[in-house]
Image (spheres, helix red, strand yellow):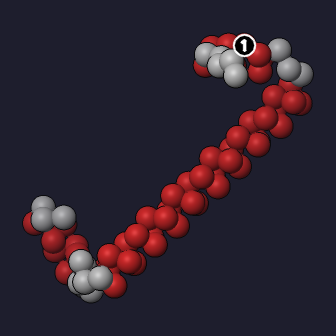
Amino acid sequence: MSTITFNQAINTVGQLPVDQQEMLIDIFRKRLIEAERQKIARDARESLSAFRQGQFTAQSANQVIQELHKGNI
């Protein structure tokens, strides 16, 4: 499999008609959004698992804010 550079990809996309460039942008924007959703879901699962294992303790929002102001978080 041959790989292309970023600049080659940009130049190739630049050769597409404008409507296809817009479709490509839309496709990649949606892919990025989905990738971010998956990352957030993975982080949430990991955090929930750590909480259930006792690695974190429940705190009120005020407690967390106080810790942030102290620089402990």
Find residue 27 and report its image quarter.
top right
Dot 1: what SS? helix
**Residue at horizontal 19%, vertical 64%?**
73
**Residue at horizontal 74%, vertical 36%?**
25
Q: Is residue 48 above or below residue 12?
A: below
Q: Is residue 65 above or below residue 26?
A: below
Q: How many neighbours does mark 1 have within 10 angstroms: few (below 14), some (14-19), or many (20 or more)?
A: few
19 sits to left or right of 71: right
In-front residue for pair 73/42: 42
**Residue at horizontal 58%, vertical 60%?**
37
Image coords of residue 41 (percent x, y)? 52, 67
Image coords of residue 14 (percent x, y)? 77, 17
Whether residue 60 can be seen here? no
**Residue at horizontal 83%, vertical 37%?**
23
Image coords of residue 46 (percent x, y)? 40, 70
19 sits to left or right of 61: right
Q: Is residue 53 above or below residue 46?
A: below
Find residue 9 and report its image quarter.
top right
Q: According to the image, label 1 marks what residue?
A: 11
59 sits to left or right of 33: left
Image coords of residue 3 (percent x, y)? 65, 19
Figure quadrant of the N terminus: top right
Q: Amino acid at mark 1?
A: Asn
Whether residue 16 can be seen here? yes
Find residue 69 and report its image quarter.
bottom left
